[in-house]
Amino acid sequence: MDNTFASACNAVEHIDARGKKQPRNRFFTVVDGRNGEFQRELDRLSLTGVRECASVKDHRTNCFLRMYKVRSREGDAFRQATEDLAEHMPELGYPDYQDYALKALVEYGVISAKEAREQTGKRCEEPESLDYYPDALFNVTGQRTDLPKSLFWKDVAFIDGCEQEGMRLLARRGFDDLKVNYAFTHKDWPRYVLIMCSIPQKRLDEFVDVMHELENRMLILGYRDYEEACTTLFRITREVENEGA
């Protein structure tokens, strides 16, 4: 997908790679307030052809980025709603809403900083690439998937012990938004569990901190072959994926 700005710095309409809008549906990402102001506006307009596909909470402001699927015939009304939202958010207690919304769209990778500058004339910094982080740890790796990448979620896999110390550490750090997709054990390594999960893109730094802590905890708990198990299980997983490709 490519992107184009739909309104005053707070929403992006996604278009397909050919530059043409979807024939039946249009897709938007909108920065909503922490009290669901945009959701209430949609309810007021009674747009029946609107469906929320995904959302992520920004932990700095408690605001939300929401992705919507909109029937094409209601696309213009939805677009107008995003513009009305941008206009009225300062009155609702969000004085810097447009600047924050633009920054959030860039930081979450919905639109590039270059595109933002070209569309709005406002200077935006490119977010730091987070792709290198999983490779810095021996117990976590990026997941392979043939599904379209989410705008808001990072797919990762890590090795936990049978006592689920890793899951406990994540829960202690408030990762109630972690999505566990699959969990596997291997007959040759019964003490370990390979967990494939999705985490919010913006919490990857926190996840990495937990994984470093997990490395130390596993040694304390007596998993002396933890590093070897991680290396072997990830290798086995890659071999299985390659065979099925």
Image (cartoon, grey):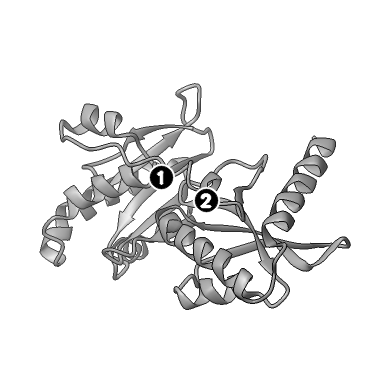
The foreground one among 217 and 103 is 217
Which residue is drawn at the image coordinates 30% and 67% (left, top)?
62
Image position of 129 (left or right of 158): left
Image position of 79 (left or right of 191): left
Task: Say the numbered circle drawn on residue 131.
Answer: none
**Spot occupied by residue 122 in the image (x, y as percentages of width and height):** 15, 35
Task: Say the numbered circle drawn on residue 28.
Answer: 1
**Spot occupied by residue 159 in the image (x, y as percentages of width and height):** 67, 61
Task: Say the numbered circle drawn on residue 154.
Answer: 2
Image-quadrant location for residue 191:
bottom right
Q: Check disc 2: other Cα within 10 Å, few if <14, some if 14-19, many if 20+.
A: some
**Spot occupied by residue 137 in the image (x, y as percentages of width and height):** 55, 51
Task: Give the CA separation, mark 1 to mark 2.
Answer: 20 Å
Q: Quadrant of the C terminus?
A: top right
Q: Amino acid at mark 1?
A: Phe
Identify the element where label 2 is drawn: strand
